[in-house]
Structure formats: structure tokens, C-alpha cells
Image (tube, rainbow, N blue to C red):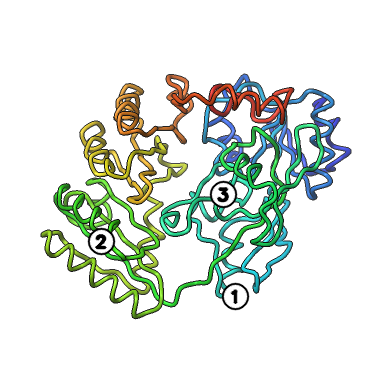
Amino acid sequence: MNAIIQKLEPIVGDAIASWENLKPVWQERIANVNTPENFPSCIVYPNTADELKSVIHKTYNNNLCVLPCGSGSKLGWGGVGKKVDVVVSTGRLNRVIEHAVGDLTVTVEAGVKFADLQEILLKTGQFLPLEPAYPQEATLGGIVATADSGSLRHRYGGIRDMLLGISFIRSDGQVAKAGGRVVKNVAGYDLMKLFTGSYGTLGIITEVTFRLYPVAEAAATVVLSGDQEAIASATKILLASALTPTAADLLSTQLVRKLGFGQGIGLMVRFQSVTQSVKEQSSRLLEIGQKLGLLETLYTDADEHYLWQSLPEYIWSTPQKPVITCKIGVLPTAAVSTLTELARLSSPSGLGLIHAGSGLGLLQLDPSTVTPKTIMEMRQYCQAQKGFLTVLEAPINFKQQLDVWGYNGNALQIMHQIKDQFDSKNLLSPNRFVGGI
């Protein structure tokens, strides 16, 4: 029996599997973050936070490198890691601890799946305004660890704007907490920011508390498409107006075609409020589109709901279709030109979506038609627009040919110091983050 399994089996019982006995889907996901010589010996599924604490205490004392995850849907994100001994999944830590309906907050264990939580919240007329990748599989801990928010950030902000409290296991197996379970509690706010988007390099999240929002009475989406200058003008007018959309996304020409919106660049704007407000705001945006000579479409009811459900499916990969997915950021004023540059560099396969208000977005490229040079050219363009490009998903041999993070800021020394304070032995998600952290 594997020596590592012998050490951990007394803690978790049969909630452990050797590499040879892993389900193919787990082997595939781990293969997207590590090369064969660095594959782990086993995966552990602690059933409680106490078991998780004991597992991490044991791995710390034995200097075993740990790759934390939830359901594993985002294991392929980030850099190619170094040797990992154990994968630790929080998937069985899946209790809803407290839903304070009157306070509009919810506290859950890290392994709760986003889709399951949303279903529970909707029964009370509330929801968590996130649109993560793979919502049926994505866990709340993984969503925080990867800072995966989505289009609704236009109205509600990112993950750290909704995160009120967090509990985690340190690399040495000790429990730590920040924040609380009420909106007014701001203690530990910086620590929660630190863990948002940390990719499991600072600790293993066990519990999170989010602020919630009431479900809107009505919703409608206006889609404008056409000439890039007209779309840029419509976007500028929208952002400077008194209109209050919950989402406003710019779509590349290829994505416009795939969604059946016509030709050219697209602008997809969602309004959610009381019925009369939604009607009034939609009408005003349609008038703007008409004056600019853009093709206009209004989606309501079931069609509108399906539209937003289907949009992510064009961006994220499936097991049958490996893709390169990048997260980008540019100045909002450069969003339209960035999508035009994408079309030039990756035609005809490149898809792009940029949130009009923040300039953050996603690109999807076909690994059979683009090269690392294409990624570097797109990154240089984003950086020229005061932004960035990070490769999230890609075949591992593609990632090995470039720096997936492409970070060119001046905070690496501080990042390394923080990593040393939280994980001095470099046992958690080693080399997966920026600068080899």
C-alpha cells in the first residue's frame, strides 16, 4: 500500500483513492495542471472540517505537497504545478450552515455547489449574483479561490464585494477565520480579499459567508449588433446614462454569429428591476440602437433566461472540445478595439466577451489554429491598453510554452512574502500561481 495512503487512511477511512483508482474525470483534470512525473499519489475527500484539519496537519508534518480543490472543475486553471503528493477535495464539506433570510446572508461549507445553493436561495426569493464557469459543478470555495464572478459583476461587483466571512485551514493544519455572518461586520476584510483569487496557495477554504440580494420582479435583455464604431458609441452612451443594467457585455463578431445576433460586434445588456422600470430602460436602449443604425433584439421571459444560461457554454470548454480560455482586462474604452484585434489575430475561431463597465472579459481560442505567439501578441495588445491577459484553460503542453500569468506588475516581492507567511514550506498548490508561487 502506498505510504502516503497509510498515513492518511486512519483519518479519513475509505474516503481516499490512489491515483490508479481515480475516476477518469479526476485523472483528466489533474493531468491539466501537472505533468505525469508530478501526478499525486492519491486524492482525499474529508467528510468534515475536523477531518480536513487532521489531514493537513499530517501532510504538514510529513512535508507533503497538497493540491486543494472542490469538485475539480477548475483544477486546470492557472500554471503548471510542481510535484504534488496529495489532492485534497472539499467536495464532501457541503452543508448549508445558516441562511439568514431577514439579513440577506448565507453561510455554507466550501464544498457546496453553486447550482445547489442557488436553488435553495430562490425558494425564498433571494439569490447570489454570480455566474461562475461550470455552475452545476463549481463549489463556493473554488469560486472564491479563483475569483470567478461573471457578467453580473457590472451591478453587484466581484466575489470580494459579496464575501462577508471566511474560515480556512492553514498549511500547518490550524483553523483561522476572518469576517463574520452579518453585513456590518468588516473585521478581517483584507484577509478575505487576499484569499479571493489565491488559487489555494494560502490555505484551504472550509466555510464562506456571502451577502445575498432579492430576485428582481422582471428582467429583459437588449442585444444590439453592427458596426464597431456604432457599438462603441452605444456603449459610451449607455455607461454615461442614468440606465442601471445588471449586466452589459460586448461580444466579438464570431460570438455574435454563433448566438444568431447578426453581423459585427455585439452589445448585450440586461435589465432586472420592477416591471415598469425594465420596460422603460429597455425602450430607451432600443431607441439608442435605432438612432445608431444597429440591429436590435429584445429578449424577455423564458427566452431571456435561456440566453444568459447558454452564453457561458460558448466560452468554456467541454471534455470533447479542448480549448484555450483566457481572462483579460483592458480599459473599458478599449474593449471594442480589443475584440476587433482578437478577430484579426484568431479569425475565424476566436470568441470574446468583455464586460463593458469594467473591461474584464474572457477569450476562447482553438488550440489547433493558434500558437503561443498568438497569445503573446494578444497579451501585448491588452497590456498596451493598460490591461492583462492570463491563460486559464489550455492543453498542458501549450501552457508549458509560455508564462500563463504574464504578470508585469511590481508586487511579486510582496506576494512571495505573503506566501512565506501563510505557507513557509510551500506545500499548498506549489508553483500554480503568479511568479511560481
Q: Secondary structure at mark 2?
A: strand
The kind of secondary structure element at disc 3 is helix
- Asked whether the beta carbons under mark 3 and mark 1 sit within 8 Å of each other, the answer is no
Label count reads 3
Q: Quadrant of residue 213?
A: bottom right
- Quarter holding the N terminus? top right
First along the sequence among labels 1 and 2: 1
Report the side of 409 relative to 270 (left or right): right
Residue at numbered disc 2: 223
Residue occupying image coordinates x 58% and y 41%:
25
Which residue is disc 1 drawn over? 124
Observer-nearest of 430 and 6:
430
Question: Which residue is nearer to you in this view: 227 or 134?
Answer: 227
Kind of residue at disc 3 = Arg
Q: Which residue is mark 3?
A: 160
Mark 1 crowdedness (10 Å alpha carbons): few <14, some 14-19, many ≥20: few
Q: What's the residue type where badge 2 is placed?
A: Val
Tell me if mark 3 has few (under 14), some (14-19) or many (20+) residues whose alpha carbon lies within 10 angstroms of its own: many
Q: Distance from label 1 to label 2 (Cα)? A: 30 Å
Rendered image quadrant of residue 406: top left
Indicate the position of residue 315 as horizontal and vertical percent values.
38, 46
**Which numbered disc flags the more N-terminal residue, 3 or 2?**
3
Q: State the separation of the CA atoms marked 3 and 2.
A: 29 Å
Q: Relative to the observer, which residue lies in front, 124 or 231?
A: 231
Placement of the C terminus among the 4 image quadrants: top right
Could you tell whether 344 is left or right of 31 in the image? left
The CA distance from mark 3 to mark 1 is 24 Å
Q: Which mark is residue 327?
A: none
Foreground: disc 3 or disc 1: 3
